[in-house]
Image: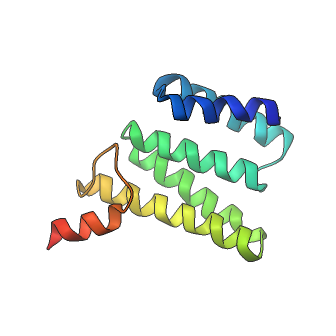
Amino acid sequence: MYVEERPCDSLYYAGLDDERIQTRKALLEAQERYYGPFTRNYLWTLSNVAEDQLQKQNFEESKTSYLRVLTNAEIHSGFDRAKTRFAALEGLANAYMSRTGLIHWPYESWTFVRAIEKTG
């Protein structure tokens, strides 16, 4: 499974969006079969797929995916749980802000600060 995960990283850094999106979806399905829906690898890939959905302006799908990450992260503890929940909450915030037009894809780091600056 590790060998299948590395090309997704490469496609992300290469900026090949369409190929990356398809590869991540396929990886997510393979991870769910191999690891199950509660492992960290699966949850991180699901959050990446949710970000891809947001990039394609599929707000409801993105929100559903981030909520699933948030829910499934509950079985973890400590730093793993906190890190995964933070990523899901940040993704949900970005989805809602994109939906309202406060931010647009591709968004930069510090999106919350920029969105607050825009609203005054």
Quarter where residue 7 is shown: top right
Residue at the spot x=24%, y=58% of the render?
102
Residue at the spot x=51%, y=28% of the render?
14
Judging depth in this view, the residue of 110 and 53 nearest the camera is 110
Location of residue 100 in the rendering, given as x and y in whole percent from the top left corner: 25, 57
Q: Where's the N terminus, which quadrant? A: top right
Location of residue 11 in the rendering, given as x and y in whole percent from the top left corner: 57, 29
Left/right of residue 55 with respect to residue 87 in the rendered view: left
Judging depth in this view, the residue of 46 and 67 nearest the camera is 46
Left/right of residue 79 with respect to residue 53 in the rendered view: right
Q: Where's the C terminus, which quadrant? A: bottom left
Location of residue 90 in the rendering, given as x and y in whole percent from the top left corner: 47, 63
Relative to 18, residue 95 above or below: below
Quarter where residue 20 is shown: top right
The answer to whether residue 25 shows anywhere in this view is: no
Judging depth in this view, the residue of 55 and 83 nearest the camera is 83
Quarter where residue 105 is shown: top left
Residue that sits furthest to the bottom in the current view: 78
Residue at the spot x=28%, y=47% of the render?
104
Relative to 100, residue 51 above or below: above
